[in-house]
Image: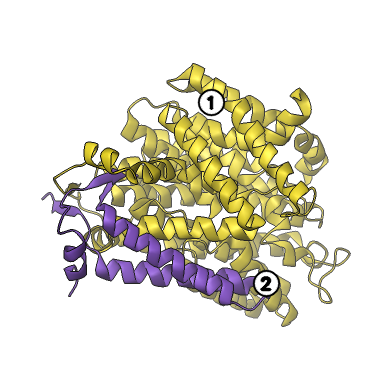
Chain colours: A yellow, B purple
Amino acid sequence: MTPVLILQMILAAFAATAIYTVVGAIPGADETATLAPVTLVLILAGLHPAVVLAFFMAAIVACKLIDAVPVSVAGIPAGVMSTPLVPHALILKAHGKTDESIRKIASGALVGTLVSIPVSLLLASFIIPYADAIKSYGGTLFFVGAIFLALMSKNKVVALISILPLAILIQGLRQFYWSVGAVPEGTNVFVSIFLAITIGPAILSLLELLNPKIRADKQVLKKNEIRLEALDHLSRVPNPFKILTKKELGLSAIASAVGSFLFILSPVGITVFLGELVASKEKDPVEKAKLALTSMEALAQGTYISGTIIPLLAIGIPLTPMAMGPANPLFNAPPVLTLENNLHHMLSFDTFVVATLIGAVIASVITFYLAVRFSRQISKLVFKYIPHEALIALFMALVLLLAHMDGGFVNVIGVLIIGLISGLFHRLGVSYGVMFMALYAAPWIMETFF
Amino acid sequence: MKGQKEMKLEKKTQTYNEIWDDLVAFRSLMLALALCISFMAGGYFLAPNQAPYSLFMGLGGALTGFVISSFLIKPKRIVIEEK
């Protein structure tokens, strides 16, 4: 490792941060779509693999961290990984605590990154032999997770009742798509179903509003008063340890560490399960939302990093969702990189450490600073000038777009169906966590019970 | 300019409805939906068949609809900053 190489890594990290802080905030700009091609291009262009790694690490950290802004301000997830945060962010928004939401999420991200890097680097070699074992228990874990979360919710019975019907509905639709030819046989539609669950309550409300009588019954005459709390003096250098309470700090650190252990499983599934689990430790709804946001974000960053680093460092084969998705070019980019000769083979442990640290630290610090420093200004701007109608319309359009891309027009209808049912369950008191777990466990449930 | 078209829409209804934890005016919502969805569909179906183009052009369309709606529709919020 020469000083020139280190300088190149630093520059790459800065470039990635600049680009992905902006791109990451755009709803619908998925990591796989926006990051994998760029990474591929950089590798094929002949950049040193360590530089590409630094670029990549900076990009995923920035991309995820900046999601704090659209999620908190508008309730719009700028990526699938941010979707579980939306309901909690909306609670804070309803209390006028939008900028606090941004700060909590950004701080959670920082904690998650800080914890996950050493955990991933240290564990890489030890964990790999257990990867297959953990993977085979994935379905069971998520089913147990669904039951667990249901038992922890307020309406236990309804929550428990909702699991099997939802699973059957989802698997039913998936198999229907196979038989109709909308989706290749064996491929499970996922992202659009996930979004359908999130958007469920909104679809239900939307359809209700089409009925003039209901519209009149539920109408409100006064505009919404958004109170932005008086800001206690934000020091010039925002300090995550001051922004987070000890509870939030501790629990999100633990969450990130555990998430790194479970790197082999779906990042979103783990985020939802552990995040909701951690948040259940808090009774007050506002504090609960803050805790959920912080730990989910820490987890998300943790799984991003561990999901990339562990396979790369330990074995060189893409095993995790992260490695198979956005990080794939790091494993396989013919003719430069192949499964027999990729970053795993080309970089030493030291180089791995340095590249990861440079990328993650630079991105974390810069994007964190931007998000937190301007959290109040961004919130105010959006509240004053961006109408809620536009936000809802944007989100709906995105869901329709992704639904069509996932499985054609029949999936658009399928998404509508799933949205309505989840919206109904949500209204009956079933939390998003339970429904997401049901989605994850669906294939396993069908195999095991039916 | 801003809000004038909306005032015509809302002449009869100055009432709002709640959806997803915030308030909307029904007709403005329909307008925003029409704009976003049609621009999104336009971009998506007019895009060349290659991999990321349809996603990006659909996305671009949705964002265009979003921006236009933001100009035409006024937020139903009163922002109060507590000192």
* Other-residue count near label 1 (Cα within 10 Å), few / some / many at <14 / 14–19 / ≥20: many
In the rendered image, is residue A264 in sight? no
From the image, tell me which residue sits under label 2: B51
In the image, farthest residue toward the top: A157
Residue A250 horizontal side relative to residue A1, left or right: left
Determine whether A152 is above or below A294 in the image: above
Residue A220 image position (x, y, % from top left): 18, 42
Tell me the amino acid under the disc marked 1.
Answer: Leu
Determine whether A326 is above or below A41 in the image: above
Q: Which quarter shows the N terminus of chain A?
A: bottom right
Q: Chain of mark 1?
A: A
Residue B13 image position (x, y, % from top left): 17, 52
Tell me which residue sits at (49%, 39%) in the image: A420
Q: Which quarter shows the C terminus of chain A?
A: top right
Identify which residue, B80 or A423, lies in the foreground. Answer: A423
Residue A366 horizontal side relative to residue A442, left or right: left
Residue A292 horizontal side relative to residue B78, left or right: right
From the image, tell me which residue sits under label 1: A149
Determine whether A415 is above or below A142 in the image: below
